[in-house]
Image (spheres, rainbow, N blue to C red):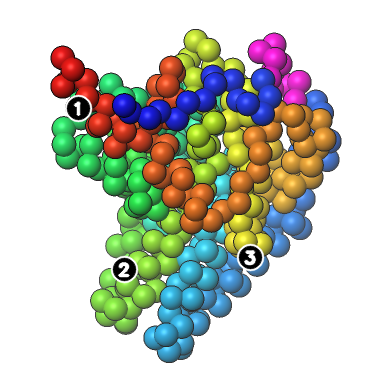
């Protein structure tokens, strides 16, 4: 018989009253958490510029045996660029929109990431967190959809949802962020601008890098740090909303307060990672309100622990065992049986075929 990961539709760590709204939770968070601090915001920018420059300087002069360490260092520092752009996308970096757009575009250029397409798609994730059919960030496939895929499609899903989860962000980046025809009206113009900007930047930067450092230089200075960045992006996105007891909801039963408060996970990473990435792991208050700047997330999280701790998912700690648990079990999801691995689904399908 196939083993399913059984879990209740309501989380075991507390069932939030369906009448509770996000505004009720927001009222309990200190108003200071929503105040932008120009000094703190720009300090993050300059700290990350220093870290990135230090990483590239190290890559330029270090012996070969230090390259893996420096790749991790530089790629994680570049992830900090993304985190600041993330605040810009939510308009929590600065009060003026043009400042958010300028800083966001600039910091995402080395990552070849169009700012506006990411901003628009990411905000959609916040509006529909853990809603089946709507959430565009690591929503698990449903069994019937997976069954309808061809062998190649099923293999690709197992590949990206399994041991190679750390590459999934690259697929999301390439497939969704450069096609401005998928957007309408003002958003289409914004996405086209962002996409063309990074394309022009790449058309200038990559030939220059190749001309001065060769193929190995492109790999050493850009490609491997870029992969490290996508490792962290894939990991953050997966870990913050995936566990065997985190439910997804169909639109008719979805509740914003419940999904944002109880469907988001706080994960502890090594302190240096949290420092480089500006506490993006303090994710629950960010889903309660995207207006909270990254440097105020800890303060807001402590408030949520005090006032809503019963309804918070237990904290997790980043480790390879955690990633093995998620990537080996949390593949397919349906409202009755919750999570099932692709292997369990295939065994069950063969058993059903044999019985019929």
Mark 3 vs mark 1, foreground winner is: 1
Would residue 186 be found to the left or right of residue 19 on screen?
A: left
Question: Magenta span has 24?
Answer: yes
Q: Nearer the viewer, residue 142 or 206?
A: 142
Considering only order in the chain, which callout, 1 or 2, is on the residue closer to the N terminus?
A: 2
**In the rendered image, which quarter contains the C terminus?**
top left
Height in image: 344 above or below 10?
A: below
Query: In 3D space, how far apart are the residues under numbered discs 3 and 1 (Cα atoms)?
Result: 47 Å
Q: Comparing marks 2 and 1, which lies closer to the viewer?
A: 1
Q: Residues within 10 Å of mark 1 (few under 14, many from 20)?
A: few
* Span of residues in magenta: 16-25
Front-lying residue, 346 or 175: 346
Residue sitting at x 49%, y 10%: 252
The residue at which mark 3 appears reads as: 272
Residue 58 circle label: none
> Mark 2 = which residue?
206
Local SS, label 2:
helix
Image coordinates for residue 49, horizontal then vertical, percent:
58, 68
Residue 350: which numbered mark, if any?
Answer: 1
Instruction: Please tell me whether residue 292 is drawn above or below residue 84 in the rendered image.
Output: above
Whether residue 113 is situated above or below residue 183 in the rendered picture: below
Q: Is residue 33 visible?
A: no
From the image, which quarter does the N terminus lie in?
A: top left
Label 3 environment density (alpha carbons within 10 Å; few <14, some 14–19, many ≥20): few
Q: Residue at x 70, y 62 (%)?
A: 43
Dot 3 or dot 1: first in sequence order is 3
Q: Judging from the image, what secondary structure is the residue with disc 3 in? A: helix
Residue at (45% x, 72% y) in the render? 71
Q: Are marks 3 and 1 in contact (CB under 8 Å)?
A: no
């Amino acid at each position: 018989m196939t083993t399913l990961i059984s879990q209740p539709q309501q989380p075991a760590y507390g069932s939030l009253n369906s009448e509770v709204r996000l505004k009720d939770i927001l009222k309990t968070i200190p108003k200071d958490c929503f105040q932008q601090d120009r000094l703190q915001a720009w300090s993050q920018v300059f700290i990350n510029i220093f870290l990135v420059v230090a990483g590239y300087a190290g890559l330029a002069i270090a012996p070969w045996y230090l390259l893996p360490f420096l790749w991790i260092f530089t790629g994680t520092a570049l992830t900090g660029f993304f985190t600041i752009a993330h605040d810009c996308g939510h308009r929590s970096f600065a009060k003026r929109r043009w400042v958010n757009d300028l800083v966001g575009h600039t910091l995402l250029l080395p990552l070849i990431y169009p700012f506006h397409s990411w901003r628009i798609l990411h905000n959609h994730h916040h509006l529909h967190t853990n809603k089946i059919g709507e959430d565009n960030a690591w929503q698990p496939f449903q069994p019937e959809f997976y069954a309808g895929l061809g062998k190649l499609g099923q293999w690709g899903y197992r590949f990206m949802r399994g041991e190679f989860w750390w590459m999934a962000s690259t697929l999301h980046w390439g497939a969704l962020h450069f096609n401005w025809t998928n957007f309408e009206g003002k958003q289409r113009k914004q996405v086209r601008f962002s996409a063309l900007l990074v394309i022009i930047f790449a058309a200038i930067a990559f030939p220059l890098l190749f001309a001065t450092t060769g193929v190995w230089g492109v790999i050493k200075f850009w490609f491997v740090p870029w992969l490290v960045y996508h490792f962290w992006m894939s990991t953050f996105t997966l870990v913050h909303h995936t566990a065997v007891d985190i439910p997804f909801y169909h639109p008719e039963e979805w509740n914003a307060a419940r999904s944002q408060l109880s469907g988001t996970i706080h994960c502890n990473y090594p302190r240096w990672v949290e420092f480089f990435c500006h506490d993006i792991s303090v994710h629950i208050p960010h889903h309660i309100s995207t207006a909270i700047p990254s440097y105020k997330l800890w303060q807001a999280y402590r408030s949520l622990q005090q006032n809503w701790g019963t309804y918070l998912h237990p904290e997790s700690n980043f480790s390879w065992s955690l990633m093995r648990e998620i990537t080996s079990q949390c593949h397919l999801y349906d409202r009755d049986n919750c999570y099932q691995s692709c292997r369990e689904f295939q065994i069950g399908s063969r058993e059903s075929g044999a019985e019929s």
